[in-house]
Amino acid sequence: MYDLKLVKRLYKNMLLVRRAEEYIAGVYFTDVIKSPIHLSIGQEAVAIGACDPLNKDDLVSNSCRGHATYIAKGGNLNAMMAELYGKKNGCAGGKAGSMHLADVENGVLGSSAIVGTTIPVTAGYALALKMEAKKTGKQRLTVAMFGDGATEEGAFYETMNFAAIKKLPIIFVCENNGLAIHSPLKKRWATLDVCDRVKSFGIKTHRVDDGDIFKIHKIMSEEIANIRNNKSGPVFIECITYRWLEHVGPTDDHHESYRDKNELKFWQEHDQLKRLASMLDEGECLIIEKEVEQEIEKAAEFAKKGEFPGEAELHVRSYVVEKKHNLLKSKTDNSRLIRYVDALHEALDQEMSRDDKVFLFGLDVDDHKGIQGSTLGLPEKFGVDRVFSTPLSEDSMTGIAIGAAMAGLRPVHVHIRMDFMLLCMNQLINMAAKAHYMYDGQVKVPLVVRTMIGRSWGQGAQHSQALHALFMHIPGLKVVAPSNAYDAKGCLIASIRDDNPVIFVEHRLLYGIESYVPEDEYVLPIGKARIIKSGSDITIVAISHMVIEALRAQKHLEKLEIAAEIIDPVWLRPLDINTIVVSVKKTGRLLVVDNAWLNCGASSEIITQVIEALPGGINGKPIAIIRMGFADVTCPTVRSLEDLFYPNGCTIAAKAYSLVTGKSCKDFVCDNDTEIDAFKGPF
Ligand SMILES: Cc1ncc(C[n+]2csc(CCOP(=O)(O)OP(=O)(O)O)c2C)c(N)n1
Ligand SMILES: [Mg+2]
């Protein structure tokens, strides 16, 4: 009844997974594998049935229970085993372990130890494949595999919605083993039909409720053909299955109370491996068994022979090495005075014209206001595939951007307030920042996140936060906060061309400020600070909009013949500490003014690095250091309190005056002028 070749192939692959995991379980307590292992024994048929009909250049992902998917998709077994042993010849050089397996060349996009995280990422990859098919005519596709637990995450529903809107070429395969660690479904699901929930997004669903490998294989084969022919998905398949062993680790836990005693018996009687074996004659089974044993022995030998990575490997691939740009300067001096927001627009327009891999998306990027004008006209010029608004799904849209970036596109994701990025932290920190290192260079994430800090007109607690320090903390991310139009354009182009994720911080009040900006494209160096004003009495390092306030302070101080050197770090990670240290050596005094809170902030980092660089002070004298930033409270809405919350030209000048003269800040009087008075809201 079934094609014998198919039966043999399924049997061989399923046996390979079973025996490989039995081997892993067998050696686990000998201490050669020192990473948590989540075995698939009992539920391998889902991965084997789902991956068999795929082509090598289709891609599949999974969460931390990923061995079966990796092997089923054709991932290199030697490299997987060496990875579990933590060796240099592992698929990620020992940086991934069992929970983050990837073999992108063979279409294993990667696993993640954060449940649900790979679902939007895999959809983002599918978005890129959809765009690719428009050029090539050939539709590749992706398969996101995940457990029943992952369907409880918000990212799952956000992704279903977006995949349905964009008709993405993706198949979602839920390996429903009824358990999330020790919690059975009935404790976690109010209604027991996940297909029903998915159908409500307009997505076609299937349910295989007996673990039948041939049913899974048939549905997958038909749906893959549909997607390839119609260049349209998505599809959702729920496969009921069962895990025989404990959640994590090599042993069984059938005595534990969270399991129903009859379940295991039922599923062992319906073991798909036994079923496949029974369809082949004994001789064939023995031959296959021998082949599988040899493959596993070979993989184990490969793993044992590998070396452990050492010091030389620790820092390798923490970032994608920066490209050398020929074009650091504009070709002609055709500068004009333009606003910051127009400089952003020009950078986007020029980069999108230069490289059709660049695309722009985010809430409202295509509306009539076009993100304060920074995206106006771009949808008409570049089309809806390359400039589009999104549902309110910040978390999954970030994952989708990451997946598209992994596939070779260069997304620019826009947030109209930085506060909204708190909904993206999982994807940004657990995936964007880590993927290149964790998968040992198999993927890059050239993603730019444009994010706006709000202020004034009562933006208050949740529309005014400046959270750059959160991102500065994370290796793998870059953070830039230009304060003038010239830097905004050159740094945005540099960020788009960089192969790493860059958080591009814009302050709402900077948008209207003008400076001379060349018409041509130009790339500014990443990690280079700018000395905005020279001076010899005090170094004032100011961040983002505080540069404007520091320049006001500088004018006040000038009247008292105090010469302040104003430095804008521009890039907060990587930080150009050298330019700051050279300045402090000259002035002997440092005032850091952050456009954020002080605690564990950019100011702490800058000051620490200066002290580390000048441990003995200057000429035996300690450096005079002070810092300013937001008041240590949540930003209040009413103007009378808001004015007290932020440093301004006067308060900065007073602090600098006190540091230089040794007198009290109170002795310093000045009139504060501010562009906030002119700002007419509402947003
Ligand atoms: C976001 C997140 N929350 C919690 C965990 C801890 N955790 C690891 S696996 C797991 C259960 C996942 O269940 P399911 O998605 O059904 O996959 P299964 O383990 O059954 O294969 C949990 C809760 C995690 N890794 N990530
Ligand atoms: Mg489960």
Image (cartoon, rainbow, N blue to C red):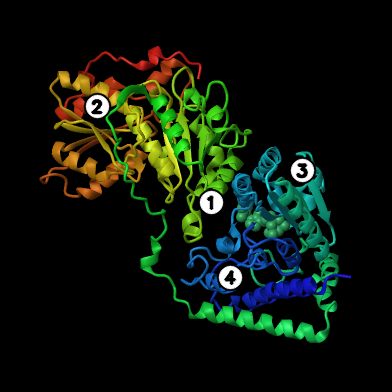
Q: Is mark 1 within 8 Å of ligand 1?
A: no
Q: Relative to residue 120, is residue 452 depicted above or below?
A: above
The residue that disc 4 covers is: 76
Across and down, in percent, residue 378 comes to 52, 29
Q: Earlier in the sequence, mark 1 or mark 3?
A: 3
Secondary element type, mark 3? loop
* Ligand 2 sits in quadrant: bottom right
Horizontal arrangement in the rendering, residue 604 relative to residue 125 (left or right): left
Amino acid under label 1? Answer: Met
Residue 203: numbered disc: 3
Closer to the eye: label 1 or 2: 1
Residue 406: numbered disc: 1
Q: Quadrant of the N terminus?
A: bottom right
Identify the residue at image location x=26%, y=36%. 530
Residue 655: numbered disc: 2
Horizontal arrangement in the rendering, residue 578 relative to residue 265 (left or right): left
Q: Relative to residue 175, is residue 24 depicted above or below?
A: below
Q: Residues within 10 Å of mark 2 (few under 14, many from 20)?
A: many
Closer to the eye: label 2 or 4: 4
